[in-house]
Image: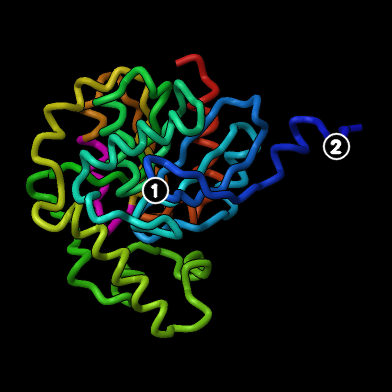
């Protein structure tokens, strides 16, 4: 019989707290055994302040830390935080605040872009890297969809193959506060990816990634096509690419068990 204080029991718990990182009141969720390998999960655009099935699955084997990236969720973005370099330094400071010398980084979409930047600039702090449908580069002949030109309904239809999987993102009420918050989060995205919507220097820097890397991509991604996953694999030394069928830009919503299992298997391997 499992005791209440066992790792299995602890891994099912979730705590919510706010920590101060260089003056930024950072909201985060945390779950899993404190003795398990630390995993920092960086969410995509407007996907902060969530704790869903895929978080719970990762927390079964890892000490999962899921912060709201500044400007998203419940974490404010200070006026001085204006470009990707500010965010890279912020995540370095976040590790210090969490008293972590090294962590696994898993990032989705915009969070994937941020995760790979940290792996490039602070390789000693990233033990393994997982990029899911990551932004950040450009593949000629395979344009990404224009996020800023879409209304919420168009965006929802673009990122989900199965609309029912997006239910956690549908607000109970489309009121003034919700609209203002969406504008705030779009403003944050614009500061990072308005023009250009990628980092022209990132491609040639990807060879600097030193840690084992997994690239996960939904086969039918209509926001960031699957060709971007292939390009990431080509440019990151010895990166592994897995394509998930029957899903697009939101595989962790539509295929949470498969998405989480692929990550867990990779992270627990010797590679």
* Residue 179 sits above or below residue 231 on the image: below
Check the image and name the residue furthest to the top: 270
The residue under the point 21% across, 39% down is 85
Q: Secondary structure at mark 2?
A: loop
Rendered location of residue 163, percent (x, y): 45, 70
* Residue 86 sits above or below residue 1 on the image: below
Q: Per the image, is 230 magenta?
A: yes
Answer left or right for 31 relative to 71.
right
In the figure, residue 106 lies in which quadrant? Answer: top left
The residue under the point 74% across, 30% down is 7
The residue under the point 27% across, 65% down is 186
Please name whichever residue, 265 or 88, is drawn nearer the observer in this view of the structure. 88
Please name whichever residue, 69 or 114, is drawn nearer the observer in this view of the structure. 69
* Residue 35 sits above or below residue 222 on the image: above
* Residue 137 sits above or below residue 51 on the image: above
Q: Per the image, is 125 magenta?
A: no
Q: How many numbered callouts?
A: 2
In the figure, residue 235 lies in which quadrant? Answer: top left
Rendered location of residue 144, percent (x, y): 18, 55
Q: From mark 1 to mark 2, how far is it between C-alphas? A: 35 Å
Indicate which disc, 1 or 2, sits on the residue closer to the N terminus.
2
Residue 233, numbered label: none
Per the image, the residue denoted by label 1 is: 24
Per the image, the residue denoted by label 2 is: 4
Q: Secondary structure at mark 1?
A: strand
Q: Which residues are magenta?
A: 220-231
Answer left or right for 144 relative to 41.
left
Tag nearer the camera, 1 or 2: 1
- Position of the N terminus, as image quadrant, is top right
């Amino acid at each position: 019989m499992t005791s209440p204080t066992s790792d299995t029991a602890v891994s099912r718990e979730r705590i919510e707290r706010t920590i101060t990182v260089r003056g930024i009141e950072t909201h985060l969720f945390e779950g899993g055994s404190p003795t398990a390998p630390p995993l920092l999960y960086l969410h995509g655009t407007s996907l902060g302040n969530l704790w869903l099935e895929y978080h719970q699955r990762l927390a079964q084997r890892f000490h999962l830390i899921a912060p709201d990236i500044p400007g998203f969720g419940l974490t404010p973005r200070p006026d001085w935080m204006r470009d990707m370099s500010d965010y890279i330094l912020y995540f370095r400071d976040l590790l210090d605040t969490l008293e972590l010398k090294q962590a696994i980084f898993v990032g989705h979409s915009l969070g994937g872009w941020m995760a790979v930047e940290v792996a490039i600039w602070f390789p000693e702090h990233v033990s393994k890297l997982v990029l899911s449908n990551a932004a950040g580069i450009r593949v000629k002949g395979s344009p990404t969809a224009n996020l800023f030109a879409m209304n919420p309904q168009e965006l929802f239809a673009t990122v989900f193959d199965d609309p029912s999987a997006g239910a956690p993102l549908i607000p109970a009420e489309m009121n003034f506060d919700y609209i203002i918050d969406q504008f705030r989060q779009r403003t944050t995205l614009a500061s990072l990816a308005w023009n250009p919507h990628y980092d022209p220097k990132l491609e040639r820097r990807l060879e600097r990634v030193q840690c084992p890397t997994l690239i996960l991509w939904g086969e039918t991604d209509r926001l960031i096509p699957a060709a971007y996953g292939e390009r990431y694999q080509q440019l990151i030394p010895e990166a592994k690419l897995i394509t998930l069928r029957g899903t697009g830009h939101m595989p962790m919503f539509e295929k949470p068990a498969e998405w989480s299992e692929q990550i867990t298997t990779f992270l627990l391997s010797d590679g």
